[in-house]
Image (cartoon, helix red, strand yellow):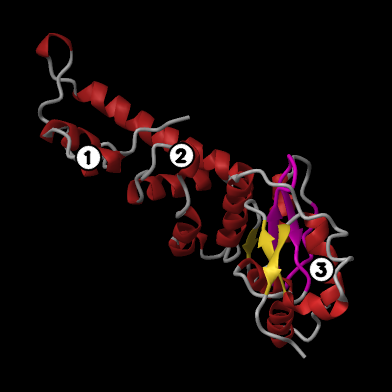
Amino acid sequence: MRLVSLSEHVSGKPSPFAAAFASALLEPGRAVPAATIGPNGKAAGKRYNVYRNNVTVSLIDALAAVFPATMRITGVDFFRTMARFHVRAAPPASPLLFEYGREFPRFIESYEHAGQMPWLADVARIERAWLDSYHAADAEPLAPQALASIEAERLPGIVLTPHPAARIVRSQYPAVTIFAANRSVGPINLIEASGPEDALITRPRLDVTVRRLPPGGAVFLESLMEGESLGGAAAAAISQSLDFDLAANMEGILESGAFTSLDHEADHDFP
């Protein structure tokens, strides 16, 4: 699905009328562009306002489709009001509708009326990562047994290639638990989690999966995705969490399909 981007109109140097027509669409307080006319040369103010409203509603609907758990948490009316403010503050910058809403989680952080839900923005970040993972390129995940044939002394220097669909979202709140509870269609049970939770979002095959990472897991994965070796990534994870379990984390990332290949060995040695 394609969406005419308002910024495209401005950056593409259209006619003065086209620029005025586009720039006023998401600002209901602005006057209807003077040159907007209907059939037989009559003024088309009402027609323009209907179109202006339809554009806003369509963008709100797009956000609702991307962030269903966020909307379930806040309720439909709260969400659509919040989304309307976001639409006016951040017009679409891409003609691809699924690209819209990348800045919505950050907007939620600054939205005054969401202040009593400090974890809401991180839930939205997981939802955005879910969509990006869904649309990412396909790739064959690394086979779980791929590391088994490598000599133990060589393992610390191995560098892995991340899967195009792999994403990490870190949170100071139980965002993964809250996300999972609100993406389902059934009744929501009491959520007892209270500590920080980091998410790994992947799509090794057809379905996107969201996993809660164990202690140190996010640092470990982020390091690997940035090109660090297994040894270097493990050292970074241990420095952040003494509870880091290398064997459990390696089993988890191979099972999740977060990587596609053994890229190469790092040049430096590890003790």
**Residue shown at 24% from the left, 38% from the top:** 9
Number of other residues with Cα within 10 Å of mark 3, as a class: few under 14, some 14 to 19, many 20 or more: some
Q: Where is residue 140 in the image (x, y as percent from the top left)?
A: 73, 47
Give whichever of 143, 123 is nearer the camera: 143
Give whichever of 224, 90 is nearer the camera: 224
Q: In this view, does 20 lie to the left or right of 224?
A: left
Residue 76 visible in this rendered orientation of the protein: no
Q: Circle 2 sits on which residue?
A: 60
Q: Residue 250: give its label.
A: 3
**Residue shown at 10% from the left, 29% from the top:** 34
Residues at circles 1 and 2 in contact by the CB criterion of under 8 Å:
no
Q: Residue 30 magenta-drawn?
A: no
Dot 1 or dot 2, earlier in sequence: 1
Dot 3 or dot 1, earlier in sequence: 1
Type of amino acid at the residue the image marks with label 3: Met
Q: Where is residue 264 in the image (x, y as percent from the top left)?
A: 68, 68
**Residue shown at 27% from the left, 28% from the top:** 49
Q: Circle 1 sits on which residue?
A: 12
Q: Give the range drawn in magenta.
A: 189-214
